[in-house]
Amino acid sequence: MSGADGFHMSTNRLATQRVVDPAAREQPRRSLLRSDAERRRKAERLVDGAIWLAAFWLLGRGVAIVPLGLGVALSLVVRRSLAARIGETVERAVVVIGTARSNLHWAGVIGMGAARGLKLSGRIDVNRQSVVELRRLLHERSVGCVILCTDGAPSTKVAAMLRCCEIEGIEVWLLPSLPAAAIGRVELESLNGQPMVAYRSTPAPSWRLAAKRAIDLGGAALGLAVLGPFVLLPTAIAIRLTSRGPIFFRQMRCGRHGRPFAMYKFRSMIVDAEAQRAQLQAANETDGPVFKMKHDPRVTAIGRVLRKLSIDELPQLFNVMRGEMSLVGPRPAIPAEVAKYEPWQRRRLSVTPGLTCIWQVSGRNRIGFDRWMELDLQYIDSWSISGDLQLILKTIPVAAVGYGAS
């Protein structure tokens, strides 16, 4: 099946009804009630397992025992802080949508702390406000979840609000009616004992996401330890000796749900490259809002080598350690580019961005912008841990030969 066929099939998925034990309706899901201590204990076990698995693998590959021991010792020292990052409850901005009365009620429920990890960021009155106002609020507040109450609200307005959130990959908790969804999977949630229907177009919180984070931390730590003295340090020295300016390039990118973060790269261009971009816009060689130029005059001599082999991207391992990026996921976009996205393209922001994804192993700059976006959505709709591992393995030879890079 082609990527395009898989993408179109995923967008035609029908919502399914689920039979739920009435007793399960009386309390929120366990993921909302789990204590921080329990979450961190499980996270520590995951980190420990990843560290020792990597150590035994390296030992079997003939890595010297002294540097291996130092690497394991360093990993174990920082494991507590890493596990805390996995186990902590990530606070999500939430918007409630409904009538003035229902909004007041659910704002009070959230304010009383009925569900950990939710922070009220706004209210939309369906009888007075439009989808345009909702979309602006989603963008400005980096909203990750919406509670949509249909009681007393016009069905056409409810459907429009739901569609707006679904297109952009925002999780929706809907009560009490159940319109059909084109993309999102229908699942039952509970807030303060009240059953809600969640439309998820991204993976739900589970042990698989915890495992993905553990792989991110273990892989990033291993990559920094192994590549540090042999690749990162020589690269830093080469940049310092061959061109004027800092070693690292810091640029604001859009993370999950559009939340901005500072992404790091080895500097591969001249110091004032960003200021010269407007002058080169006419030479852009790709479609869509992104800028790609095969023979960009702003790239330094050493920068061409770094970009060809993707070495300039390696400092993003620090972003992975910080939780701003993952090893695998859609590439983080520049805010100015995201501002030009079509609504359906914004759904790629619904997951944590990554170092590599389907686009990177399928030709990169040889692929058109819309097809790039479709591949990212295909990754979101078919995500699995085994799929991530396969993409990591495919990325290594692609980066080594510089296929599709410029």
Image (cartoon, grey):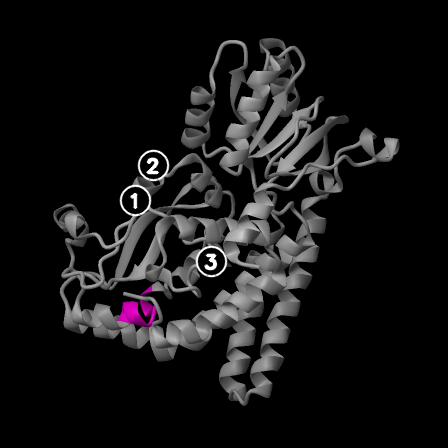
Q: Crowding at label 2, few (<14), some or many (≥20) Cα neighbours within 10 Å?
A: few
Task: Give the main secondary structure of the magenta stretch.
Answer: helix
Q: Of tags 3 and 1, which is closer to the observer?
A: 1
Q: Is residue 190 left or right of residue 83?
A: right
* Residue at 35% across, 71% down: 403
Give the percent coordinates (x, y) of residue 75.
Answer: 54, 69
Disc 3 versus disc 2: distance between alpha carbons? 24 Å
Disc 3 versus disc 1: distance between alpha carbons? 26 Å
Any mark on residue 36, and which? none
Work out whether residue 231 or residue 385 is closer to the camera in this orientation and state it.
385
Work out whether residue 291 or residue 73 is closer to the camera in this orientation and state it.
291
Q: Which badge, 3 or 1, is on the more N-terminal residue?
A: 1
Name the residue tied to disc 3.
320
Q: Of tags 2 and 1, which is closer to the observer?
A: 1
Disc 2 versus disc 1: distance between alpha carbons? 9 Å
Amino acid carrying label 1: it is: Pro
Amino acid carrying label 3: it is: Val
Name the residue tied to disc 1.
289
Quadrant of the snapshot with the N terminus: bottom right
Q: Do the residues bearing badges 2 and 1 touch, measured as CB atoms within 8 Å?
A: yes
